[in-house]
Image: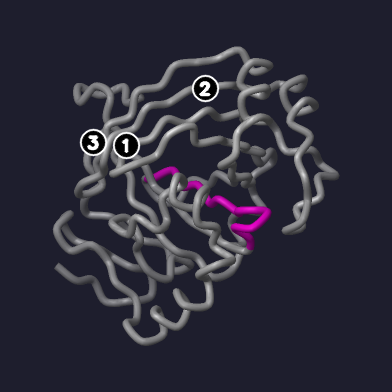
Amino acid sequence: MSDSDFGDFEFERKFYVREMPAVTALDPQPELIVQAYLFAADGYAVRVRLQGPAPVDFDASPNSRVDVTSLADADAIGTMTAKGPAAGGTRYEAERELDPVVAGQIVSRADHVITKIRYSAWLGEDGWIVDRFLGRNAPLLLAEVERNTPVVDLTIPAFCVTEVSEDDRFRNEYLAHHPFVDWAANYRDELSKTGPRFVQHLGTNEVEGRQPRP
């Protein structure tokens, strides 16, 4: 939920990443996130999330399984979120906190679940996150930047290969129903043919190592 005058709206931009950015090593405590989608259709979704510190010895291999009960017993946070369709980097999002035990019980019983490790980094004037997906969504890496107002005039880190803010395939609810492993090869082939793309209607993009475009 935003703290700005825009109320229950989130403003973010999302990017596809090929390799784990070195800056993620600076995060002293990555977060382990397990979230279930109870409903997802036409851009609307209802999500239950359980989030807590990733164990130091956590097995982050693609086939690793998360003990949701243990995660709920740790210093975890449970939430339920309702989302609306996204447009221009803006999406309605209303969130309320849940008891982590209740959130864990819901997630453990859900059919459409994604698991990821989240790393945070401060780059320039913006806070960024990098999500490393596990299970059938491995080895997908996505980077996001979020602000309290529309994300315009953005300096994009060099590790961001292409922008996927307006590509619904990279929304978590889509990945929960259509795991990346099933279409990763096709996407990489598509990317090699089209090349990188960045949203051009949100001010000026300045990509590290590349010439800025209007």
What is the secondary structure assignment of the residue under circle 1? strand
* Vertical relation: 197 (above or below) 39: below
Query: Residue at left 50%, top 70%?
Result: 183
Left or right: residue 17 versus residue 88 is: right
The nearer-to-camera label among 1 and 2 is 1
In the image, farthest residue toward the bottom: 193
Reading the image, the residue beneath label 1 is 44
In the foreground, 212 or 60 = 60
Q: Which residue is mark 2?
A: 79
Residue 136 falls left or right of residue 168: right
Cα–Cα gap, marks 2 and 3: 23 Å
The residue under the point 25% across, 47% down is 89
Mark 1 or mark 3, earlier in chain: 1
User: Does residue 8 appear to the left or right of 122 in the view shown?
Assistant: left
Q: CA distance from mark 1 to mark 3?
A: 21 Å
Q: Residues within 10 Å of mark 3 (few under 14, many from 20)?
A: some
The residue drawn where x is 62% and y is 37% is 34
Tell me: 19 left or right of 146.
Answer: right
Mark 2, Cα crowd under 10 Å, few <14 / some 14-19 / many 20+, is some
Segment colored magenta: 126-138
Q: Mark 2 is on which residue type?
A: Thr
Badge 1 amino acid: Tyr
Residue 135 placement: quadrant: bottom right
| Residue 61 location (% of width, % of height) | 77, 57
Residue occupied by mark 3: 149
Whether 40 is among the magenta residues is no
The percent coordinates of residue 153 (x first, y second) are 22, 54
